[in-house]
Image (cartoon, rainbow, N blue to C red):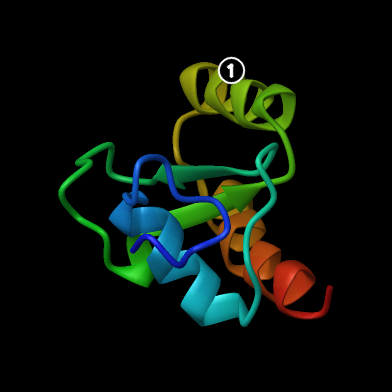
Amino acid sequence: MPEHPNSKNGWILEHRVVVEKFIGRYLTESEVVHHIDEDKSNNEIENLMLFKSQREHSSFHIKIKKFGLNNQIRRQIEERWNEFKNT
């Protein structure tokens, strides 16, 4: 995708494009897309989670390691898309 404003040598990572199409805007360079099941080949939107920064992404990993993927964290994943779609 050489026309993409964030492409590197004409390429952009597929999971970032999937999220951009879902939220209707380009991602910033600081935003991080996380694969919920940690399978980087699974780029279904239900498996992707967007973070505003690497710091926020790292905090999420710490929370998952400590508490597991519980219902509260699953709700956070679902609510996050509404937050990004409205920005």
Amino acid at dot 1 = Ile
Q: Is residue 7 above or below residue 60?
A: below
Would residue 18 be found to the left or right of residue 84 on screen? Answer: left
**Relative image position of residue 71 (x, y in whole percent):** 54, 54
Lateral position of residue 24 relative to residue 46, left or right: right
Name the one closer to the observer, 36 or 2. Answer: 2
Query: Which residue appears at 34% of the width and 51% of the height?
Result: 10
Q: Secondary structure at mark 1?
A: helix
Vertical side of 12 occupied by 59: above or below: above
Q: Nearer the viewer, residue 6 or 16?
A: 6
In the image, 31 versus 1, the foreground residue is 1
- Place of residue 86 in the rendered image (x, y in percent of width and height, measured from the top left): 81, 80
User: Would residue 19 be found to the left or right of residue 60 on screen?
Assistant: left
Asked if residue 63 lies left or right of residue 15, the reply is: right
Give how far across and how far down residue 59 sits, in percent: 67, 23
Q: Which residue is mark 1?
A: 62
Residue drawn where x is 66% and y is 56% of the image: 76
